[in-house]
């Protein structure tokens, strides 16, 4: 106990000033570290949000003010690819029974092997659908659920 009292009594103004400077420096370093960590967390969070959500909301094209988003386009491309693969399998099955479907198979193969071609075809189809929807709305043409169901049944 006597040694501690001696040490505290031996602190000069110079020592006190130095300790105070060191405390301030440690506080500044700690604050800068927390700010840097915060900035890194924000940047990583924004990057994640951009990859998972924001990019999918960007328009691939705009048709008279109606946006076709990246997400909508990608979903349609995937659906079209699955449909083409299914059709390809059906046609190869039908060829076993003597049907000549080589031209259709070649066309489907061309779309399946060229992602750019498939993507552009789907985008063109989506643009045409948007134009048809807009023109139908302009002319006041509507279709009820019952009419759609009836057409499906026929």
Image (tube, rainbow, N blue to C red):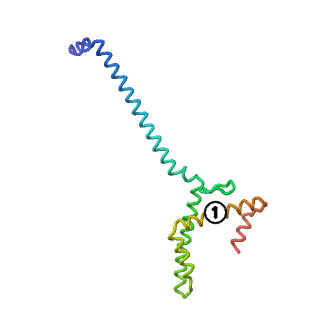
Who is closer to the viewer here, 17 or 3?
Answer: 17
Q: Is residue 31 above or below residue 50?
A: above
x then y, percent, for residue 149 = 70, 68
Residue at image location 56% in from the left, 76% down from the top = 107
Give the structural element (helix, strand or loop) at label 1: helix
Who is closer to the viewer here, 114 or 20?
Answer: 114
Q: The N terminus appears in which quarter of the rendering?
A: top left
Residue at image location 71% in from the left, 67% down from the top = 148
Q: How many marks?
A: 1
Residue that numbered label 1 is attached to = 126
Q: Is residue 42 above or below residue 3?
A: below
Q: Which picture quadrant has residue 123?
A: bottom right
x then y, percent, for residue 82 = 54, 69
Q: The C terminus appears in which quarter of the rendering?
A: bottom right
Q: Is residue 94 above or below residue 28?
A: below
x then y, percent, for residue 142 = 76, 62
Q: Is residue 66 above or below residue 3?
A: below
The residue furthest left is 3
x then y, percent, for residue 50 = 51, 48
Residue at image location 54% in from the left, 78% down from the top = 105
Q: Which picture quadrant has residue 153?
A: bottom right
The residue furthest bottom is 98
Q: Mark 1 packing: few (<14 Cα in 10 Å), some, or many (20+)?
A: some
């Amino acid at each position: 106990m006597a040694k501690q009292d001696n040490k505290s009594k031996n602190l000069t103004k110079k020592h006190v000033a130095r300790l105070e400077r060191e405390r301030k420096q440690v506080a500044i370093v700690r604050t800068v570290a927390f700010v840097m960590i915060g900035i890194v967390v924000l940047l990583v969070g924004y990057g994640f949000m951009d990859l998972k959500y924001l990019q999918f909301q960007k328009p691939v094209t705009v048709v008279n003010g109606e946006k076709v988003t990246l997400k909508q386009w990608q979903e349609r491309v995937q659906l079209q690819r699955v449909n083409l693969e299914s059709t390809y399998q059906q046609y190869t099955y039908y060829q076993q029974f003597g049907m000549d479907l080589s031209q259709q198979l070649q066309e489907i193969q061309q779309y399946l092997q060229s992602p750019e071609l498939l993507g552009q075809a789907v985008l063109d189809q989506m643009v045409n659908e948007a134009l048809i929807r807009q023109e139908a709305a302009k002319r006041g043409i509507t279709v009820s659920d019952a009419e759609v169901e009836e057409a499906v049944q026929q």
